[in-house]
Amino acid sequence: MSLDPVQVMKGQEAAATPAPTTSNGDSKGSWESSKDVYEHMGSTKKPRSEPVRRVRKVEGGIFFPKPVNAVTIAVSSRVLFRTEKEQKVYDQMGVEEYLRYQVEHENEPFAPGPAFPFVKALEAVNTRLRELYPESEELFDIVLVTYNHAHVGVRLINTINYHNLFIERFCMTGGTNPIGYLKAWQTNLYLSADAEKVKEALAEGIAAATMFMSEKQTEVSETQLRVAFDGDAVLFSDESERIFKAHGLDKFFEHERENENTLLDHGPLKGFLETLGKLQKKFYAKGQRLNCPIRTYLVTARSAASSGIRALKTLRAWGLETDEALFLAGAPKGPMLEKIRPHIYFDDQMFHVEGAAEMGTIAAHVPYGIAQKHKKSSNPSK
Amino acid sequence: MSEIKPADIVADSAIDPGEEKDWAAAKAFFDSLKTKTPRPPKPRYAVTIAVSSRTLFNMTEERKIYEEEGVEKYVCHQVEHEHEPLKPGVAFPFVKALMTVNARLRELYPESEELFDIVLMTNNHAQVGVRLINSINHYDLTIERFCMTGGQSPIGYLKAYMTNLYLSKDSEKVQEAIEEGIAAATMFSAAMQNQLCDHQLRVAFDGDAVLFSDESEIIVKKHGLDTFFEHEKEFENKPLAQGPLKCFLEALGKLQRKFYAKNERLNCPIRTFLVTARSAASSGARVLKTLRSWGLEIDEALFLAGAPKGPLLQKIQPHIFFDDQMFHIEGAKELGTIAAHVPYGIGQKYHKGKLIEQPGGKK
């Protein structure tokens, strides 16, 4: 298996590297205009003393797609930014003090949180999509869905502008459960720090995962969105996991071999992989397969020869692809993920999520399936 | 009927002191009467909501008779069916919710007059009054104040009642009211209706041209989104001018604070929502800062950046949603939300973003 070398954007240079020779004659023109857009956005590496309100140009492109056409990613404020200090103020001193603190520190931007690189990468993909399909509304749309009160809104807006993000849709629920709003936004993926909310979302049929802040963070690509999925109980249902847990490995292998041609049932994140695939195909259609800004990975503890076929056949039957498939047969996922450097890695078992986080991978827990009743580690990470 | 204040009597020098004492005594007696049913609050303390009979009750059939067969037949029909209560109308859930809030307020503040007060303001003929009263009693509503104007404009009465909000089906009356500085909106019935909360009043507001003036809307329509974003960024710290419904939000906020004062924040029976088509990062800060500078809070803020409001309103299930653009009202109606149109500002000249060619007509 070959992994692409990590492309880390330094300044603006990487964006302007010439397109491969297979692209059509129009590519040069579109690269020039995209370079202009990057320059207007401003570099994220320049140090700032106070939040600078940049004005994003939105005419001449689709920046506000209708939720029904777009791939909507809902993030909470706690995963987009680091809000531990404020959280402590809330827990220890109550809501009035918390609001006062937030208003006082309004002009201090938050530091990026675990979902920040993911959101940045989504925007990079959007820029590429707009170049190729200027009229299409099939873009990523990021909605901030937060329990927070509207008072905190100004600080969140200042932070978003400071970091040059494009998040224009907000749902500040002031304490109401945000789950109902997720459906109204036709959310394709919901990321939160609160496992209860994530479980509720999953119960409603919305792909969701809990994100954790790890102390160590490896650098991730700024030009290619990389999403890694576990297999069982994430892309697929947990049926096989049940057999494994109940009857052991041998029975599991037998069962998989016998049912090789029976499709596995789908899991909570299958829909999200599907939407990524749909966007990928748009790039392929324009001859951009080698340069596609979305890359998906299957990283499963399954054994290839003994139980891998069923997984691959299932994906094929669903018409889905993953760009890379790693069968680990129980080997630790940490080192592999460190090499892949995904912007997000979905797994249903906290054991794996913790292992990944230890090595600096941004991991998200999908609280679904039988594995939730068997915890290998008793202390959840932050 | 507004109560006669002692000051008015003193001003009239024709009354002799004996009569004056009688009036004062009568008033004192009246004021001290204890009744089991709660007394309506004085208009200057209360939050007065004026509703028309057609918004409170569903009078479409009766209306048809009036339009097709004339006023005599209409009055006859109403008198004949006097004992049949009318069906609930589009403002009915809203009024019921107001009563629920009043009940909670009375529990916490038994002596206070800061309550909702509902006035029925209708063009109807006095003969129809009986049927209206019967209907009101049938549904156990507390509407003690009536204004049957028999065709006259209600504006003067609205002012006399210090009306905080006027709801009607007649957009001309609503426009008049807005021009006179009274918060008003035209109500539209939805085809189907969502289940509404029965213990919490939920009111949703649009931002521009409803809570705020239409100054920003004018910039968008004339110069486009990019200029609008630049303008909002430049004037981020300058509060927007107020819109027609700002004072109603203020009145709601005042009542909300009474609940907070008694530690009922988590259980407050009034909840307000801002549902705006503005973009959060590019133009949202000015809105939030303006609300803050007015000392107003809003419980939930939804910045849609152009996404359709219908599905979100369906989730919120407000008892009433105020917007200045018919386009959004229609979207809300389609998904079962009770929507009220505020005919104010430049949005009236546009439909779905395009200038309407109107030869000086209304809207």
Image (cartoon, coloured by chain):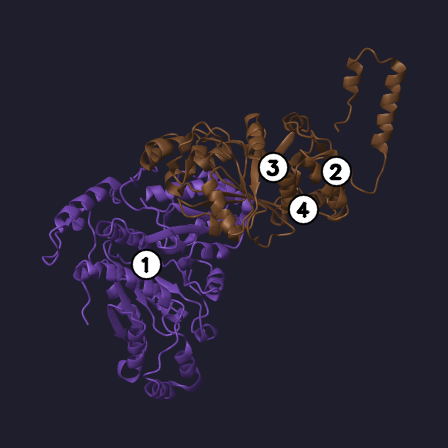
Chain colours: A purple, B brown
Name the chain letter of the residue that bears numbered label 3: B
| Left or right, residue B86 beside residue A67 | right
- In the image, residue A270 lies at what x, y percent? 36, 68
Q: In the rendered view of the protein, which quadrant contains the N terminus of chain B?
A: top right
Callout 3, which amino acid? Ser
Q: Which residue is mark 3?
A: B168
Mark seen at residue A216:
1
| Left or right, residue B252 beside residue B285 | right
Nearest to N terminus: mark 4 or mark 2: 4
Neighbours of disc 4 within 10 Å: few (<14), some (14-19), many (20+): some
Residue B320 visible within the image? yes
In the image shown, does B11 or A2 lie closer to the viewer?
B11
In the image shown, does B317 or A86 lie closer to the viewer?
B317
Labels in figure, total: 4
Residue located at (71% from left, 34% from top): B125
Task: Choose top left, top right, bottom left or bottom right for residue A37.
Answer: top left
Secondary structure beneath dot 2 equals helix
Residue located at (60% from left, 52% from top): B196
Neighbours of disc 3 within 10 Å: few (<14), some (14-19), many (20+): many
Nearest to N terminus: mark 2 or mark 3: 2
Task: Choose top left, top right, bottom left or bottom right for residue B10.
Answer: top right
What's the distance in space between the residues labelled 1 and 4, CA to CA?
56 Å
The reply to the same-chain question for discs 4 and 2 is yes
The reply to the same-chain question for discs 1 and 4 is no
Callout 2, which amino acid? Gly
Q: Which residue is mark 4?
A: B96
Above or below, B11 relative to A148 = above
Name the chain letter of the residue that bears numbered label 1: A
